[in-house]
Amino acid sequence: MDGARSIDLPIWNDLEVPLLRTPREFVAELHQRHLPQPGTTVVAVLDPEHRVTASASFATRPHITDGWHHRNALLAQLRRVVPHDLRLSVPVRTAVLLRCREGSPEWTEQDGAWMWALRDAAELHGLRCGSYLTLTPAGWHSIGDGRRGRNPHSGSWADGPIHTVTELPPRPVRELARELGRQHPVGALPVVPVVPVVDAAPVATVGTVTALDSVRRAAGR
């Protein structure tokens, strides 16, 4: 990999990247928003008060190790979720990156490529380069400043909300909806009145009526 498209830890520390005020809460918020699985990258933009104003998650091809390709992917996501700040003389917002992956939580060459991409994409979008974090089986880790925690981790996405079939309407309702859809065009479905349920009167059979008549005639004699 071209060394100009990667950043090692000594160079990263020399960048004086602004630290996250509450990295644990930040990671928890991003995880709740995106439920990243291994292979997912989450980029977030923080306002001057360190609040998340925009974020996006996307998957990348694992065999790509060139920071230039990662930079292009980050720029595409930033342009999609937030306008640039290139008109400002000094950046006021910060771009932060969270990568969910397998392996060790410590710095790797692949992380170095993503660090280069984050720095370059942030500059091209008028943002400050912020923290770089990993999410691995060991938990989360803010590379460079050493802050870390056990939760969430790369497998925590499985604990998120799951939409199950029990959340669907009952089968008779679904079948009625499909039948109405076949009988009427879209946008012209009739309003189905709600019929109140009342206690039904007992049903008398012919044999019951005949027996009652016999009893009445006998009583009259």
Image (cartoon, rainbow, N blue to C red):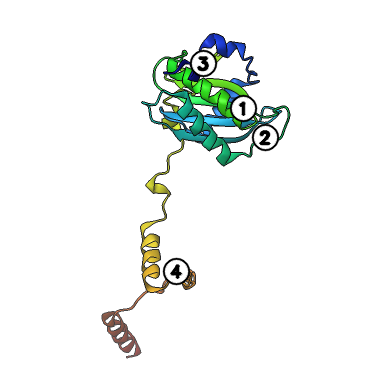
Q: Position of residue 182 (x, y in %)?
A: 36, 70
Binning the other alpha carbons within 10 Å of mark 2 as few (below 14), some (14 to 19) or many (20 upward) gives some
Binning the other alpha carbons within 10 Å of mark 1 as few (below 14), some (14 to 19) or many (20 upward) gives some
The residue pinned by badge 4 equals 186
Snapshot quadrant of residue 138: top left
Snapshot quadrant of residue 50: top right
The reply to whether callout 2 and callout 3 are in contact (CB within 8 Å) is no
Q: Position of residue 71 (x, y in %)?
A: 51, 29
Q: Position of residue 52 (x, y in %)?
A: 63, 32
Tell me what residue is drawn at x 26 percent, y 81 percent.
Answer: 207
Helix, strand or loop at mark 2: loop
The residue pinned by badge 2 equals 85
Q: If you read the primary sequence from the N terminus, does the residue marked by circle 3 or circle 4 appear first?
A: 3
Q: Which amino acid type is shown beneath numbered disc 1?
A: Glu
Q: What is the number of the mark on residue 7?
A: 3
Q: Is residue 15 visible?
A: yes
